[in-house]
């Protein structure tokens, strides 16, 4: 390949990569809770995970598990998040937590990030116990930066991973509450892989 063709090929590849990346939302109503300039000031810390600011992200990679719980409660909203997970990371976004002092999948809607969940029915992109994903898994998060968008309006909820809809739900068991970011134990309670959140935004509706 001559030099000119190599340059054109590189430019085309770069353009396609940029085109395929999601852009963070902006405009009135959006509240930024995590970005490169923020630490843990917007969150209540629950559990023993070692949450910290590192490399322009909020990171956890040690501990039995824990959550960052939003200080405010939300009913109808859109969440936008950018995160990096390993293949063995057990994480997720728990929305409308009915018990903010003890966040769990049976007291909130758990939007999962876990590519190797032992029961893959509710693996990455699912709403655990409510909205399964196809098996074998179509959408995985491990080893790359991803975007997740969650829209909750009344009983209606939609989850998108990297722009693709992975789960929809109509359920009004949990009408409102804080949301939480998870660092969870891995398979057989081993230490799970790291989770990095470089941007988390919410727009109450």
Image (cartoon, helix red, strand yellow):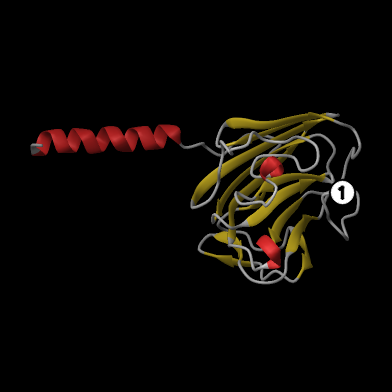
Left or right: 61 as drawn, with respect to 48: left
Residue located at (38% from left, 37% from top): 17
- Quadrant of residue 135 in the image? top right
From the viewer's perspective, is residue 154 above or below residue 202?
above
- Depth check, front residue: 16 or 123: 123
Q: Is residue 180 left or right of residue 164?
A: right
| Residue at left offset 78%, top offset 33% | 152
Q: Is residue 62 visible?
A: yes
Residue 82: x %, y % from top left: 58, 47
Asked whether, in this view, residue 155 is left or right of residue 33, the answer is right
| Residue sitting at x 71%, y 42% | 122
Quickly name the residue at label 1.
Answer: 106
Q: Residues within 10 Å of mark 1 (few under 14, many from 20)?
A: few
Q: Position of residue 1 (x, y in %)?
A: 10, 37
Residue 175, quarter of the rendered image: top right
Q: Residue at 76% across / 43% down in the picture?
A: 128
């Amino acid at each position: 390949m001559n030099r000119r063709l190599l340059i054109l090929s590189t430019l085309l590849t770069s353009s396609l990569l940029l085109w395929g990346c999601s852009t963070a939302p902006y405009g009135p109503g959006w509240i930024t809770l995590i970005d490169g300039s923020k630490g843990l000031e917007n969150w209540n810390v629950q559990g023993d995970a070692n949450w910290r600011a590192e490399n322009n992200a909020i990171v956890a990679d040690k501990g039995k598990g824990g959550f960052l719980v939003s200080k405010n409660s939300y009913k109808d909203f859109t969440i936008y998040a950018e995160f990096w997970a390993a293949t063995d990371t057990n994480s997720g976004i728990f929305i409308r937590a009915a018990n903010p002092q003890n966040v769990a999948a049976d007291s909130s809607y758990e939007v999962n990030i876990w590519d190797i969940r032992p029961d893959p029915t509710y693996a990455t992109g699912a709403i655990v116990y409510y909205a399964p994903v196809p098996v074998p898994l179509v959408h995985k998060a491990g080893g790359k930066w991803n975007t997740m968008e969650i829209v909750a309006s009344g009983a209606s909820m939609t989850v998108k991973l990297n722009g693709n809809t992975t789960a929809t739900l109509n359920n009004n068991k949990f009408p409102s509450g804080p949301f939480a970011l998870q660092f969870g134990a891995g398979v057989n309670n081993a230490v799970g892989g790291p989770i990095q959140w470089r941007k988390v935004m919410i727009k109450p509706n």
